[in-house]
Amino acid sequence: MRRRALAIAVLLAFAAPASAAAMKSRPQPGAVVASLYAAEQAGRAPLSDPGERARALTPSLSALWSVVEAAAKRRNDGDPPPDFDVVTNSQGSTLKSYALAIERADATHATVIATLVDDNWLRASAREKVVRYDLVSDGSLWRIDDIHGVAEPRAWSLRAILSESLK
C-alpha cells in the first residue's frame, strides 16, 4: 500500500502543472494508468471488463476491442485477442510493485511509462518489465489510446494486435 501511494505521489510531483487551479480542474495523464495498476494489485484485471475499458480507453480503442470480442464470439474462437493481460504484460503475473513516469506530455498527448516488479513471474529480459501508455486528452479527461510492450523478441501494440485479429 505504501509503495503504491509513494509511486502515485512521485508521479504527481513530476506531472504537477504550474498552478494549483489547473491541477484541480484537470486530471493528470498518469492517473488513469495508476488506476489500472491499483486494480491489478487488488486482484482485478481491469481491462477485461468492458465498462473499465470504456472509462480508461479512448472511444476508438474501446470500440475496436468490442468489435474484436464480438467477432471472436461469432466465430466461437474462445478467448479473443489480446490473449494476455496487457497491463502486466503477462499471463498470470502477480504485481509486487510498479513505478510510473511521464516520458513526455503536452496539452493533448502524453506517454506514461510503467516499470513493473513481479512477485511470481520470470521475464525474458528487462524490456518486458516496461509497459508504455500513449494517452490523449479531450481537454478534461486523459484516456489511453494505445499500450505498447515487449514479449521477447518482439514489440507489441494493443491497437495493432486488435486490428490484426480482424484481418
Image (cartoon, grey):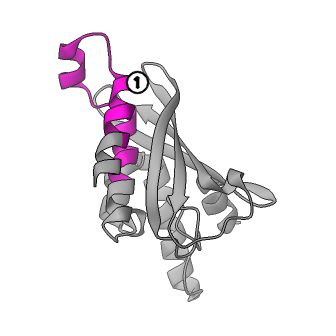
Is residue 17 highlighted in magenta? Answer: yes
Q: Which of 163 and 17 is in front in this view?
A: 17
| Identity of the residue drawn at 28% across and 31% down | 27
Residue 94's x, y, as percent? 46, 70
Is residue 45 highlighted in magenta? Answer: no
Residue that carries the numbered disc 1 in the rendered image: 14
**Direction right: furthest residue:** 153
**Is residue 120 shown above or below 1?**
below
| Identity of the residue drawn at 40% across and 24% down | 14
Residues drawn in magenta: 7-36
Point out the image quarter for the C terminus. bottom right
Number of numbered tags placed on the structure image: 1
Name the quadrant containing residue 77.
Answer: bottom right
Point out the image quarter for the N terminus. bottom left
Q: Nearer the viewer, residue 66 or 92?
A: 92
Residue 20's x, y, as percent? 20, 15
For the stretch drawn in magenta, what is the main secondary structure?
Answer: helix
Residue 98 in view: yes
Residue 32's x, y, as percent? 35, 44
Residue 156 in view: no
Residue 139's x, y, as percent? 32, 25
